[in-house]
Image (cartoon, rainbow, N blue to C red):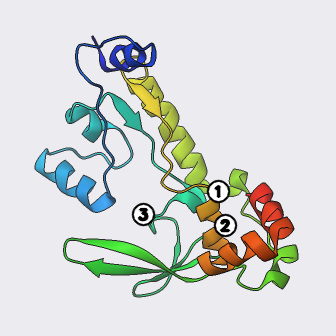
Amino acid sequence: MNPKERVYTVLEHKKPDRVPVTNRFTPEVAGMLSEILNINSDDSFDLEVELGHDLLCTKEIGIVNVFTFKDSRQIDNNLYIDEFGVLKRKIEHGGGSYIEIVKNPLEDLNKFSSYKLPDPDKQPVLQKQLKNFKENVEKYGKTHAIVGGVTATIFEAAQHLRGIERVMVDLIENEDFLNELMDML
């Protein structure tokens, strides 16, 4: 039974030869594992396949990508601004790092009417990722189940643009605005 058959068997509520597996890695962990396993593959599923995963999970892009600054503009040492106008700081710790949001582009509600989301058709990172997805589906789609990766939802996207405290207040005091923001996203 190949990985894709295994996943489909489970989805049909039948018993597979073994439980299908998958796992997600932060970029640092993926890098370390790739180095240990001698895999030189930044944007493909080679690492997951090597580790025996049945489901291959795509990488996130856009505002839901919480792990990387790859396509953000660097302001100074550890400060970046992404294509959505979210100002982020990279905090290093031990062998890894995490991202802290410093400033939200829609902190001020008055900025909403003039705020424009980036045009997906004009973002090279999206075009590159789409090309990569197609290549991965061609390479692994017959043998593995491929699923979309989402580390954050539309709710988190609103938090990135507005700030978590303001979104929580908006849930009660600005419901129409929050609905409009989420519709836009």
Q: Earlier in the sequence, mark 1 or mark 3?
A: 3
- The residue beneath circle 3 is 67
SS for tag 3?
loop
Instruction: In this rendered view, identify the residue nearer to me: 18 or 29.
Output: 18
26 relative to 107, above or below: above
In the figure, residue 21 lies in which quadrant?
Answer: top left
Left or right of residue 14, residue 152 in this image: right
Q: Position of residue 34 (x, y in %)?
A: 20, 49
Instruction: In this rendered view, identify the residue nearer to me: 85 or 94.
Output: 94
Q: Position of residue 111 (x, y in %)?
A: 81, 81
The quadrant of the image that shows the C terminus is bottom right
SS for tag 2?
helix
SS for tag 1?
helix
In the figure, residue 113 lies in which quadrant?
Answer: bottom right
Q: Residue at x 18, y 51 (%)?
A: 33
Q: How far is the residue under mark 2 from the one under mark 3? A: 17 Å
Q: Residue at x 62, y 80 (%)?
A: 165
Residue depth check, mark 2 versus mark 3: number of the one nearer the observer:
2
Label disc, if present, on residue 178 of the rendered structure: none
Label disc, if present, on residue 158 of the rendered structure: 2
Cβ atoms under marks 1 and 2 closer than 8 Å: yes
Which residue is most to the left?
A: 36
Q: Position of residue 168 (x, y in %)?
A: 66, 74
Left or right of residue 67, residue 21 in this image: left
Left or right of residue 118, residue 55 in this image: left
The disc labelled 1 sits on which kind of residue? Ile
The disc labelled 3 sits on which kind of residue? Phe
In the figure, residue 159 lies in which quadrant?
Answer: bottom right
